[in-house]
Amino acid sequence: MATTQATANGTWQAERSNRGWLTQTVLAGYVGTGYLNAVPDTDLQFTTSYTTTSPELQYTLYFTNTGVYTVWLRGYAPNAAGDSVYVGLDNQPVITLTGFLPRVWSWSQAASPSGIATVEITEPGLYTLNVWRREDGFRLDRIVLTTDNSYIPTGNGPPENQTGSLLRK
């Protein structure tokens, strides 16, 4: 099994449309030093041109193994109007990831309109995982990518890799 794990501290972020991702520690139950909150929470949705208008997080990841990776996010949805984000690979939109329980930290790999959130790695190397805001108010805590179809993160998820490679086997 190959599993890549990243904390909510993105390697880069772009504020757009006078909105951004703010690192916070106010809401109890996060893992590590904080979580990222899509602020401000005014029930704004980004449904078109989101790759150029929505606030974005980027995570640079090195993959040694090819394959289809399931994308798991640990997040907190304040309500149904703040329970989804867009996820892509190398600036290419891939999926809408949703399905977070309201008012509790939870894991989801649910892709809208139906299915499981996945990205395909066709050759080893550096890739950029993109997370764009779809609905404001969503809080992002952790990201796990795995080729193990039977793996389901629970609680805080796997321990963070301290080597900096973000790759777990």
Image (cartoon, grey):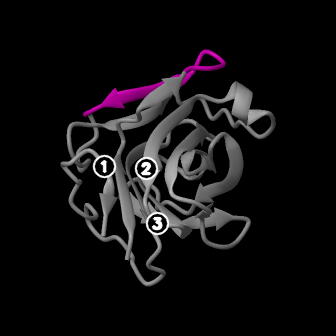
| Residue at which label 3 appears | 65
Q: In the image, residue 92 lies at what x, y percent?
A: 71, 45
Magenta range is: 15-25
For residue 62, the mark is: 2
> Quadrant location of the C terminus?
bottom left
How far apart are labels 3 and 1 at the CA level? 13 Å
| Mark 3 Cα shell of 10 Å, populated few (<14), some (14-19), many (≥20) | some
For the residue pair 78 and 13, the one nearer the viewer reads as: 13
Which image quadrant for residue 120?
bottom right
* In contact (CB < 8 Å): disc 1 and disc 2: yes
* Above or below, comparing residue 54 to residue 5 in the picture: above
* Amino acid beneath label 1: Ser
| Mark 1 Cα shell of 10 Å, populated few (<14), some (14-19), many (≥20) | some
Query: Mark 3 falls on what kind of element?
Result: loop
Q: In the image, residue 40 lies at what x, y percent?
A: 52, 25
Query: Mark 2 falls on what kind of element?
Result: strand
For residue 165, the mark is: 1
Residue in the image at 46% along x and 40% along y: 59
| Mark 2 Cα shell of 10 Å, populated few (<14), some (14-19), many (≥20) | some
How far apart are labels 3 and 2 at the CA level? 9 Å
